[in-house]
Image (cartoon, rainbow, N blue to C red):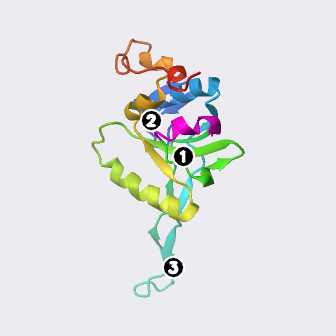
Amino acid sequence: MGKNKKSKIVYNNIALDSLEEYQFFCWLEEAKELNVVYTFEYQPDEFLLTNKKTYIPIYNNPKQKEKHLFREHIYTADFKIQFNAAYGEILSKVFKIDASMLINETITVYVDIKGSFNQNGGDRLFSIHQKLVYEKYGVLVQKIVPKEVFKHLGIAKASLHTPTGRPSRIYSSYNFIPKMFDI
């Protein structure tokens, strides 16, 4: 089950929350075969943004019993990716990369996948999560819209089909990963 407890797609025994996450997962798998990606993790360890808070009411509380005020607030990125730094120039067309992300020729990036249309205002909430994660942990979680990213990084061959195997023309005009990375 995905982090949102509403997984829509099961691929390689992994429950993915959206079609965009499936498409990006396929991209990561193919990029890994091509040595553009070293490793990736779906829904990596969560970030604790605020601790649980309680209080002791001073009125109408003869036993001085502690009461619940707020639950803890956590955030989980969609992917943690370790890229081959040899492709940093191409990757920088899509990702914000600074020196703190580069260790031993590996660029580590956290991403949150978004669709091109977001009906429930998830971008506003993501922006708050992004700021809090950066402030508390020094980690920049980057928003990725696969349809935009694939214009610069190419598509996986799997993107030419839906998760059920039917042909899809969403990315029919896009180049494949090897062409974009000169592999």
Residue type, label 2? Asp
- Please say if the residues under marks 1 and 2 sit with CB atoms less than 8 Å apart: no
90 within the magenta span: yes
Residue type, label 1? Tyr
Whole-number angstrom distance, CA of label 1 to CA of label 2? 17 Å
The residue singled out by tag 2 in the image is: 17
Residue type, label 3? Lys
Q: Quadrant of residue 39?
A: top right
The residue singled out by tag 3 in the image is: 65
Q: Which mark is residue 110?
A: 1
Mark earlier in primary sequence (3, 1): 3
Please identify, in this view, whether the residue under mark 3 or under mark 1 is nearer the observer. Answer: 1
Q: Is residue 29 above or below residue 57?
A: above
Q: Secondary structure at mark 1?
A: strand
95 within the magenta span: no
Q: Nearer the viewer, residue 105 or 150?
A: 105
Q: Which mark is residue 10?
A: none
**Residues rendered magenta in the picture:** 83-94
Q: Position of residue 33 (x, y in %)?
A: 63, 23
| Label 3 crowd (10 A; few <14 / some 14-19 / many >=20) | few
In the drawing, does residue 31 fall left or right of residue 147? right
In the drawing, does residue 117 fall left or right of residue 154? left
| Label 2 crowd (10 A; few <14 / some 14-19 / many >=20) | many
Mark earlier in primary sequence (2, 3): 2
Task: Residue at 57% x, 60% y: name it.
Answer: 138
Whole-number angstrom distance, CA of label 2 to CA of label 3? 40 Å
